[in-house]
Amino acid sequence: MSTETSTDFKSYLTPFNIVTGLIIIAGLIVTVIRFTGGLGAVTNLDDNYPWGIWISFDLLCGVALAAGGYTTAAACYVFGFKKYQSAVRPAVLTAFLGYALVVLALHYDVGRPWRLPYPIFVQQGTTSLLFEVGLCVFLYLTVLFLEFLPTLFEWKGWKKLRDVLVKMTLVLVIFGVVLSTLHQSSLGALYTIAPSKLHPLWYSAYLPVFFFVSSIAAGLSMVIFEGTLSHKYLHRMMDSEYNRNHNDVILGFAKGCSWVLFGYFALKMIGLTYDNNWHYLATGFGVWFLVELLGFVALPAFLFAVGARDNNFPLIKWTAILTVLGIVLNRFNVSLVAFNYHLPSEDRYFPHIMEIIISVFIVTVGIVAFRFISTRMPVFFEHPDYKGQH
Amino acid sequence: MEFSSLHEFFMHTKTMTYLLMGGILVGAVLWWQFLMGEKRQIENPHQTDEENGQGHGH
């Protein structure tokens, strides 16, 4: 008896559990400080920077990187690429967790989190872009939850409820794609309100289009990246069908992502030309802009194309990481680096360590939740009772 | 480059944008050619040369 107990205890002390456990404890401590001491106790936010890393990373990056849900679902159900079916459930789960954590992060970021439902249910600001973002995220999170529910129902064995929801799949996917188009672009449109604050190289009337198009690249890359990680660490949960389609998904998404990045690069050049901002390229911000554009847009577009042509899977997987980093860099540039660019360096914002802890905590919660769900529910495999019913 | 009026500025930048868009259209065709170009064959040792699409089925 005593031997069994010690074995069970030992099995929980894996490196993954220790690291995530420490991060979650640190996050909970900062959470207590945040909700007892207010925003000032844990952040470096001020009047110049009312939005910090929680908006830049948790919200802007989180929403963009969760775009895998609508891109994969649209590819499979709207455009009819049924070979990507196996990637839909992991992508929808990632998107659902991503958006749920965006909402969780918002509770930390807004001064009075108990008023979060206000703009939806009490006082609608229908002329505000922020209202549109809030409404879309609220509705899209609901759609993602409904899209994910069949997985839960299959796990619990609730067949009738599951069948009702599966019949609604196409409607939900179309609704989700429309909502994603709206709020991905609106997040970019939010920054068109600050033409004097955002550096001209990043400010453009096309910001909504930039955000939307780059979110597609982010979504496709995240599916490749997350699929690679899942293959490495959750391989035991995958059935032969998933494994057979894995390479097709990676090749197809690499091709798609190469095209999208090509288009995104072209759009950025059009934005640059339309505003005649060429002379800024010779400045320090110009060099940084070129690093983002050439190193994290043009280069991955080319590498994805080479990888897809040569069936070079390691190259495609590394390029997916480069693209994800590029999208994070772009969102940081728009919302932090190039924002308030005219301020002296001593007035510039740098996140407080506790802000970073909360962001890491939220990502960790997402990873733990993904691992918990995908090791229990039929995410990477078809449930034996529902073979061929998707 | 100096611009005396907003109209002059828009005329210039719109002209440049149209030229760029023409270049992008040509570039998109070349990109398609590059991306969808000849694939490197994956050799399957369990198949014959003919099945691999290379030989004449000796």
Image (cartoon, grey):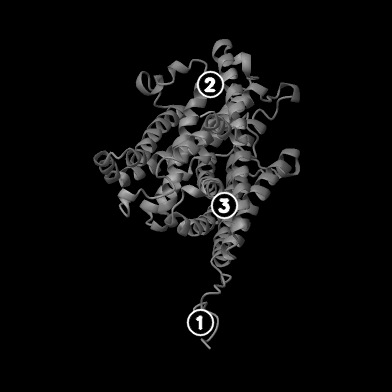
Mark 3 chain: A
Q: Which mark is residue A108?
A: 2
Q: Given contact means CB atoms under 8 Å apart, are the residues at marks 3 and 1 in contact?
A: no
Q: Residue furthest front?
A: A1
Q: Which mark is residue A261?
A: 3
- SS state under label 3: helix
Q: On the image, numbered disc 1 is attached to which residue? A: B50
Q: What amino acid is found at the position of numbered circle 3 in the picture?
A: Leu
The quadrant in which residue A47 appears is top right
Mark 1 chain: B
Mark 2 chain: A
The residue shown at (35%, 45%) is A174
Q: Position of residue B37 (x, y in %)?
A: 56, 69
Q: Answer few, some or many: residues within 10 Å of disc 1's Cα (few below 14, many 20 plus, some between 14 and 19).
A: few
CA separation, marks 1 and 2? 63 Å
Q: Is residue B5 something one can see in this rendering? A: no
